[in-house]
Image (tube, grey):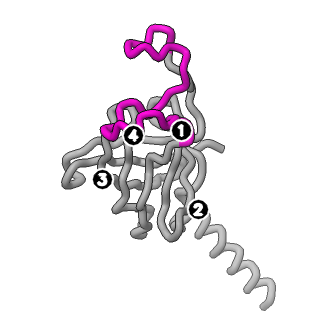
Amino acid sequence: MRNLLMSLILVLCLCGVAMGAGPDDVMGRWLNQDKDAVISIYKCASLYCGNITWLKEPNYPADDKKGMAGMQKVDRENPDASLRKRPIQGLVILWGFKYSGDNLWEDGRIYDPKEGKTYKCKMTLEGDKLNIRGFIGISLIGKTNVWTRQK
């Protein structure tokens, strides 16, 4: 009887891992769709947030049109002038996500430092792929990027 109970517990644990239905499953390091940045998603209080932890090109290229060649990339497109000197590496770009069940995190925001714009956002986890949907107003009017989990 004890072996049967232990086997049942093991099967239930393995099923839970395979389904990936836990709220913390989104946490970890994610390579963005353009493969030029890694974003680390972590818990911030009872919600989920994420910051840029790696950039393929952390400095501006030699032909930078804004005269910042060779300098560290900063948040220069931010509409708030007082924030334009913040380094991109380390910048929080995801915040306020709550787990809604069925591998869905919603009610969050995503900031695009390339454009200096913030969008409503939801995330859907499918195995080692994270669908990031940024939108204005309703989710139908938006764009989805697919990020890949880094191991």
Cα–Cα gap, marks 3 and 1: 20 Å
Cα–Cα gap, marks 4 and 1: 29 Å
Q: Secondary structure at mark 4?
A: helix
Magenta highlight range? 61-90
| Residue at horizontal 50 percent and vertical 13 percent from the top | 69
Q: Amino acid at mark 1?
A: Leu
Q: Amino acid at mark 4?
A: Ser
State which quarter of the image contains the C terminus.
top right
| Residue at horizontal 29 percent and vertical 41 percent from the top | 143
Tell which circle, 2 or 1, labels the residue nearer the N-terminal end: 2
Tags 3 and 4 touching, CB below 8 Å: no
Cα–Cα gap, marks 3 and 4: 23 Å
Tell which circle, 2 or 3, labels the residue nearer the N-terminal end: 2
Tell which circle, 3 or 1, labels the residue nearer the N-terminal end: 1
Cα–Cα gap, marks 2 and 3: 29 Å
Cα–Cα gap, marks 2 and 1: 22 Å
Q: Which residue is mark 4?
A: 82
Q: Which residue is mark 1?
A: 31
Category of crowding for the residue at label 3, using alpha-carbon neighbours closer than 10 angstroms: few (below 14), some (14–19), many (at least 20): many
Q: Which residue is mark 2?
A: 18
Q: Which residue is mark 3?
A: 120
